[in-house]
Image (cartoon, helix red, strand yellow):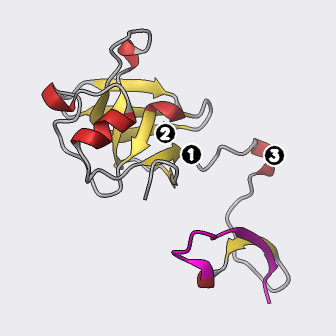
Amino acid sequence: MTDTDTHILAVGDMAIARYVDYRENEDNPWFAATVTNLNYDDNTIDVVFEDGDESNGLELEEVRYAPNGRPNTIGSDSMRCNSVFDLLAVAPNLQLAAAVLRVSLPAESRAEPRTLVLGDLVIAKYAGFRGKDDNPWCVYFIV
């Protein structure tokens, strides 16, 4: 997973995040965090940091998902970095993905979950492309 990949966030996900009170500061580092709430009405995220501080109402670009976890020390001492690239230089095994909310679509385009039936039109990925550089979304009918 790279920083260009995306992940639909869930409460409890390990992440790195900005501290909301530092938004206007030149020093605006990333910190080790855990997702505590997803605010679908305004597409923001709440997190709790390792030291117990919280940031509420973070924008999507202020959070990165860490699929394999992250060092608890991100944000302190030698791991206090203002850019993701600098952070990856000091923590080279850290894997990150951009955060998204599943309701990023307009409300009128969202549908309640239901069982698919023959003839339904879907957008899906072809299993034969899994793991390849070219892994496009395709339009299919359920047959």
Q: In this figure, which residue is indicated by the disc labeled 1? A: 101
> Helix, strand or loop at disc 1?
loop
The amino acid marked with disc number 2 is: Leu
Identify the image quadrant of residue 23. top left
User: What is the crowding at mark 2: few (fewer than 14 residues within 10 Å), some, or many (at least 20)?
Assistant: many
Report x, y in % for residue 103.
64, 46
Residue 69 placement, left or right of 121: left
User: What is the crowding at mark 3: few (fewer than 14 residues within 10 Å), some, or many (at least 20)?
Assistant: few
- The part of the chain drawn in magenta is 129-143
Separation of residues labelled 3 and 1 (CA atoms) = 16 Å
Separation of residues labelled 1 and 2 (CA atoms) = 8 Å
Q: Which mark is residue 108?
A: 3
Prevailing secondary structure class for the magenta stretch in the rendered image: loop
- Which residue is drawn at the image coordinates 56% and 45% (left, top)? 101
Tags 1 and 2 touching, CB below 8 Å: yes
> Helix, strand or loop at disc 3?
helix
